[in-house]
Amino acid sequence: MRRHASKIFCSLAMLLAARATFAQAPLLPPIAPPAAMAPSLPAGTPAPVATVPATPAQNAPVTFTADEVQYDQNAALVVARGRVEAFQGGRILRADELTYNRNTGVATARGNVQLIEADGQVMFAESAELSNQMRDGVLEGLRGYLLMNGRIAANGARRTGGSIFDLSRVLYTVCDPCKDDPLAPPLWQLRARTATLDRTDQQVRYRGASLDMAGVPVIWLPYFQHPDGSATRQSGFLSPSFGITKYLGGFIETPYYWAIDESQELVLRPITSTRVAPNLGMDYRRRFNNGEMEILSSIGHLDGRDGTEEGFAGHIFAKGRFSLDETWRAGFDANRASSEQYLRIYRYGSQRVLPTTLFTEGFWGQEGFARFDARAYQGLRRTDDLDRIPLVLPNIYADWESPEDSLGGRFTMDTWNFAIFRGSGTSTRRAASRVGYALPRMDDLGGIWTLRAQSDLAAYDFEDINLAPNFATGSPNGQNAAANIRTALDWRMPFLRDGGDWGRQVIEPRVQLVTGPMTGSQYRIPNEDSIVFDFTDANLFSLNRFTGRDRQEGGTRADMALRGAWFLPQDRQLEAIVGRSFRVQEDGGPFYPYSGLENRASDWVSRLTFRPASWLDLTGRARRGGESFAARAYDVSGTLRPTDDTSLTLGYLQAPPMPYLNPVAQREEVYLGAFQRLGFWRVGAFGRQDIQLNRPVSLGVSATYEDECFIFETRFVKRYAEDPATNDLYPGATMLLFRFGFKTIGDFGLRAL
């Protein structure tokens, strides 16, 4: 019997009475004759769709459509032809023709066979024969689309249990076909004699495989395995990296990734070399309901060559962040290493000092903040005096800002207290607080007036102040207190002009009068937080221009500056500011030579920002002598971007001698960097030159190719860092890297140090 319709919709639930033993087929249940089991319908009337109770997705009823259905009752064969489509539980089977034998339970699909899985993976075949309730089958001319752009092809395949495909004569790639020649070999592909696509383990395993580049075999792999793209994380070996260095000789790193469970993972990174004992790196990460933790560590052995330490060595970098409630969180940063040379040799970083911190902190919107922490530091160079490295326990800071009062002003309050201990040198305990107030007003002419006040109060207890890293002299032990009050009246008048197509112009003079008691040299107060000081336009109008509380600026002064800006259409801009400060008293206070504020009239400070077009940015800061106008400090940089794919950066830095640095010397450097994108390529280069010493500081070049399936990266970096004790370059100051990345299957690299 044969029935035709524009589209015939059938449900297997209608046909279960014919033979109930086939009801559990996962993809296509048995099909009974639509005409023999149902009354005849008028021509052109579609067959009804049966309604059945809801069942699990795997055993859910299967609905299929076809242009034509034929049933042979004697042979127990159901044949559907013309745009056949069957779907169940997220799976879809499409074919030109589908034949189902009710006696044997075998379904045969022919012509443009498509099997679409619930996760989006698609299999194509010339024909497919499915049995065992459609769990097993044989497919010819298999082609498949996997996740992450994966493509797989095979002469034939055997499906077992609904989840395992055994393939023969296999090709796999994630590269898109060439647009000009779709039949050309892809950039890379895996070719194998046999392969297994395991949907349960979410893996693809190859035997007798080779890696082809542009159709040419380059690597032979007797066995290879990679994820099929549907798994987010899986345990297994990661791609190895190789290299050669002066200290290690030849080496290989073979990392292993262990997905412990849904919340934690571990990466083991053993490094085996020809000249030293093996090194083992370990990266552990874990997520909690209220935070996360990460521990990066390693252990190894150095033999004392090239001035390195001798014996067991290692490092640990750990951090954690945990939310206690909606307001408070706690955390830690623990960093320790056996030496700076060890970190450089194995490329674990090149830190000069390692901090360790334990803290808790709270946030109250925009109004309040509090933090309690303890800090320890480790110096990694042999020239470090370990007894003078501080231990900070505790360090307490809190601040609060009031809502705007009836006059339009705001109060701010904070406290900063700590205890610092040293084995040799100054040990300090400090309790300090600061109260500030700011009230802005605008006059009838458009001038902006701001009244500001700031009060500081601090109490100290200290030992061995003469040995501290500051400029104080006097008896070594004692207690002291310091107070300072600063008030200021700040006025600025922005003159605005709207030039239409020529943009807007702004000229803004600014004058600030600051007064308060004289503070003197402050030699009886330890200096823990105000050693580093840089006078620029950024702190010209600060009430206290030191960064911390241990040094206070006093007396009466006037700060003056003139700012001009021209804002043009198309994001073009020219802005400049120049200013200086004048102190009434002769006493220079705690400012050291070359600071720019040691004289009554300060140095000139200025800043220039120039953007004549979207493709050019120029920024410069300068400080010049107040009377001689001699150059004291420069920081100038420019970036040229003629296209979105090209950039060129040039910089110049000149810094005056700093008494807290050793050696005390002027620093003068130039910097050059370039970047270019060419299609799939990105190339770059940089270099930094020390003009004073007439030698390079660092230089490097890089080139990267990346498309949808392949990454190639090469990089060369050399740093000219010296050990002050030996004047020798540090081990690991040079790096040469080659990396080959085959997306979805892994990458490997070659590294030289």
Image: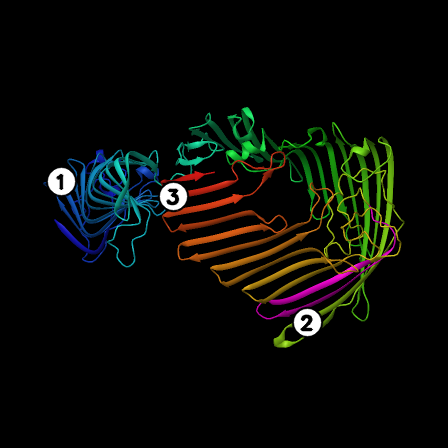
For marks 1 and 2, the one nearer the N-term is 1
Other-residue count near label 3 (Cα within 10 Å), few / some / many at <14 / 14–19 / ≥20: some
Please say whether residue 579 is one of the residues in the magenta stretch: yes
Q: Which residue is mark 1?
A: 76
For marks 2 and 3, the one nearer the N-term is 2
Foreground tag (2 vs 3): 3
Amino acid of disc 2: Gln
Task: Report the predominant secondary structure element of the magenta stretch.
Answer: strand
As drawn, the label of residue 713 is none
As drawn, the label of residue 505 is 2
Relative side of 498 to 426, left or right: left
Q: Which residue is mark 3?
A: 740
Disc 3 to disc 1, C-alpha distance: 57 Å
Other-residue count near label 2 (Cα within 10 Å), few / some / many at <14 / 14–19 / ≥20: some
Amino acid of disc 3: Phe
Q: Which residues are magenta?
A: 552-581
Q: Is residue 592 visible?
A: yes
**Is residue 43 positioned above or below 75 on the image?**
below
Q: Secondary structure at mark 1?
A: loop
